[in-house]
Image (cartoon, helix red, strand yellow):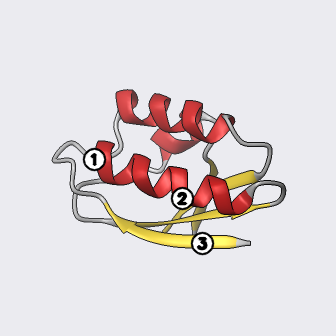
Amino acid sequence: MKKFTYRITDREGLHARPAGLLAKAAGDFPCSVTVEKDGKLANAKGILGLMRMAVKCGEEVTVTCSGEREAEAEVSLQQFFQQNL
């Protein structure tokens, strides 16, 4: 299991466009990818679950990758967050 924490810097938070892009990026990997905020978990491969979390600018999320190609997914998703959120 690989895990990282990221503080959202996009002033609009995790809204529809980046949530859709995140779901697509997470879907490129066979491992399980979850996003956690304040004890709430969402499957990163599902846009609706991500949007229901209502992550705002300045809030921290923890991303967990578990399973096949988890290390590769962690690196790729860290880059995604830095570039898009």
- Residue designated by label 3: 3
Q: Is residue 76 above or below residue 1?
A: above
Side of 10 where 4 appears, left or right = right
Q: Residue at x 38, y 35 (%)?
A: 18
Given the image, on which type of amino acid does mark 2 rest? Val
Q: How crowded is the residue under tag 3: few (<14 C-alpha within 10 Å), some, or many (20+)?
A: some
**Mark 3 or mark 2, which has the lower sequence index?**
3
Splitting the image into 4 quarters, where does residue 26 fall? Answer: top right
- Residue designated by label 1: 13
Please state the horizontal and vertical placement of residue 51, each as a whole percent of the image: 46, 39
- Residue 53, can we see it? yes
Check if mark 3's residue and mark 2's residue have beta carbons within 8 Å.
no
- Residue designated by label 2: 75
Given the image, on which type of amino acid does mark 3 rest? Lys
Foreground disc of the pair 3, 1 = 3
Please state the horizontal and vertical placement of residue 3, each as a whole percent of the image: 60, 72
